[in-house]
Image (cartoon, rainbow, N blue to C red):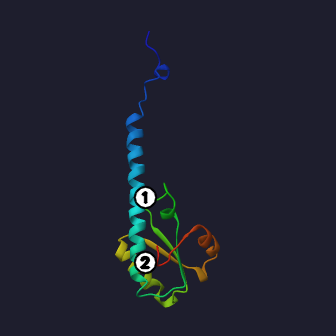
């Protein structure tokens, strides 16, 4: 008599899937850290051309396991001239070759959450 497939405990072997999944997780974390490092360098460069009072990095790039190749980068900025907002966004996005969202904290209803959960950029970063 043939046993039903549901009784065969070895029917599904997930070991290859688990191995690939672990490698992807490691790759995504390395990508996140490299992107964050590049972002800090670009912000340092742009700080020579733009003035702001405070800048915060927030969102998936700040959280391990949440950032992937399709993620955008979220920035909260306070004190940036509102007429330079889109130029700043374009410069960031162009240098990083990635989608970037720049939120003016003065105009943002969740600015306190960004300040408390985000990474504040300083020249020492």
Corner quadrant of residue 45: bottom left
Q: Nearer the viewer, mark 2 or mark 1?
A: 2
Q: Nearer the viewer, residue 49 or 125?
A: 125
- Relative horizontal placement of residue 117, taking residue 84 as reference (left or right): right
What label does residue 29 carry, if any?
none
Q: Residue at x 47, y 76 (%)?
A: 124
Which x, y percent locates residue 12?
43, 29
Which x, y percent locates residue 117?
59, 67
Mark 1 residue crowding within 10 angstroms, few (<14) / some (14–19) / many (20+): some
What label does residue 43 carry, if any?
2
* Residue 3 vertical position relative to residue 31 in the rendered view, above or below: above
**Residue found farthest to the top:** 1
Which x, y percent locates residue 39?
41, 71
Q: Residue at x 43, y 77 (%)?
A: 43
Q: Which residue is mark 1?
A: 68
Corner quadrant of residue 95: bottom left
């Amino acid at each position: 008599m043939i046993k039903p497939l549901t009784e065969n405990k070895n029917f599904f072997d997930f070991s290859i899937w688990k191995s690939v999944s672990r490698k992807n997780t490691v790759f995504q974390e390395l990508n996140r850290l490299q992107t964050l490092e590049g972002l800090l360098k670009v912000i340092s460069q742009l700080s020579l051309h733009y003035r702001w009072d405070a800048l915060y990095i927030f969102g998936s790039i700040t959280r391990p396991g949440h950032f992937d190749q399709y993620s955008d980068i979220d920035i909260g900025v306070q004190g940036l001239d509102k007429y330079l907002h889109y130029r700043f966004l374009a410069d960031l996005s162009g240098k990083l070759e990635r989608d970037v969202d720049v939120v003016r904290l003065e105009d943002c209803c969740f600015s306190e959450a960004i300040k408390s959960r985000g990474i504040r950029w300083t020249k020492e970063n």
